[in-house]
Amino acid sequence: MESSERAGLVLRPFRGVRYAVDDLAAVTSPPYDLISPEELRDLLSRHPNNVVRLILPGISHYGEASEALSEWLATGVLTVDSLPGLYVYEQSGVGFLQRGLIGGIGVGSTAILPHENVLPEPVADRLALMRATQANFEPIFLLYEGGGTASRLVDDVAAQRFPLMDVRTREGVHHRLWAVTDPHEIEAVAEDLHDRQALIADGHHRYATYQALQKDHIGPGPWDYGLAYLVDSTAYPPELRAIHRVIPGLPLQEAAARAKGAWQVQEFPLVEDALAGLATATGPAFVLAGDGPAHLLTDPDPLQVEHAMPPGQSPRWRMLDTSVLTTFLLPKVWGITDSEQSVMVVHHDPLDAVERARRLGGTAVLLNPLSTEDVLTVAAQGERVPRKSTSFGPKPRTGLVMRTFATD
């Protein structure tokens, strides 16, 4: 990639790979890391060509995804758009509307701001899949402060042109897609975006995978770009939701008892009442729940917290709930290392996390969502929040448009 491209925000047109089946809703899925085992079985039963066969082929079965991709392209289940383009993508439902552009984002640009740490295992998993398939199946989700030509084009296209696809999923969300293939419009978008920055809202592990895949190759090529969905956050402010934790090996009563040496701990018979207290808490706070009464943790001992913090982090970073969780509560209070093996994550639904904790005889740690302002400030300072700190939404649906290296 040219050095000038590395310095700017580049969204490149590509020839989209799209399904040519009658029931488009039945072949799409949520992002790979939001799919539970039960949902995976349901998605597989909906359609023999559901995209989960590509994105979740199972550990050590990445070749199966590659074979399925080749077969579906050969038999016409998947087709390749004849012209390269950017894709306007719209999601809408009860009380929300989000629009943006899907294209190939320039990998390695200083204009792309990660804000969250990653773990090596998920990157290795996605890298094995992308190496086997030579494809990007799922767009990462980027936010930028727009208000320029690209933003106006997105709304003009959605208002005035006939979509390539119009899909309503079982979840009640409407998805529409348009192709922008006019070279003048594509060039106008490029000029508008070049001097801007974009925050990775979702897809840190996949972006790290794009970077690793780029390092596999010498010289320019399709690996210099990765599939991305770019949304103007000034026109369409994102929703930021919490990601909760479940610790299978830590009984709830033990977790609460050990927390009393460093926190104010208040007991609630109903988890809903504890969550109400969490929502109004100022400063770091958590709810511990599972089999038994819930416990609200507030006002941690500031000296103990400060002693646990790694050097060099900003005051803003040190006050984030997820920073306190991963550097103090987990390792210092409970003696637990934050890893995929010891700490499960549950997106959005606190009661789901509580139910999982009950089944496993463990503890659910329920969090407030971080503020968008905190995340942007930390990222602008060059810092990264702990893994699984944020869940921006609404996230793009997987399977509406994909990208293969051979066709790009």
Image: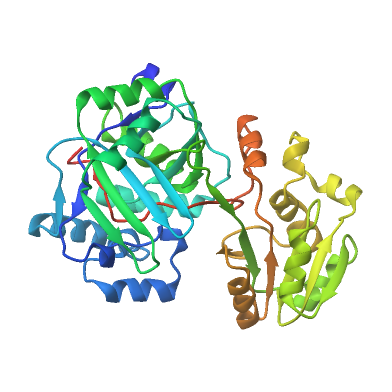
Q: Is residue 154 left or right of residue 183?
A: right
Q: How many labels, in total? A: 0
Q: Residue at x 73, y 60 (%)?
A: 279
Relative image position of residue 219 (x, y in whole percent): 29, 26
- Residue 251 visible in the displayed image: no
Q: Residue at x 36, y 35 (%)?
A: 214
Considering only vertical position in the picture, is 144 above or below 139? above
Give the quarter of the image for residue 55: bottom left
Q: Residue at x 74, y 51 (%)?
A: 327
Relative image position of residue 263 (x, y in whole percent): 87, 61
Identify the image's colour scheme: rainbow, by chain, secondary structure or one colour. Answer: rainbow
Q: In this orientation, which residue lies closer to the viewer: 39 or 186? A: 186
Where the N terminus falls, by quadrant? Answer: top left
Q: In this orientation, which residue lies closer to the viewer: 197 or 172? A: 172
The residue furthest front is: 160
The residue furthest top is: 4
Q: In this orientation, which residue lies closer to the viewer: 329 or 155? A: 155
Considering only vertical position in the picture, is 78 above or below 250? above
Relative image position of residue 325 (x, y in whole percent): 73, 55
Q: In this orientation, which residue lies closer to the viewer: 161 or 218? A: 161
Relative image position of residue 87 (x, y in whole percent): 28, 40
Considering only vertical position in the picture, is 242 above or below 116? below
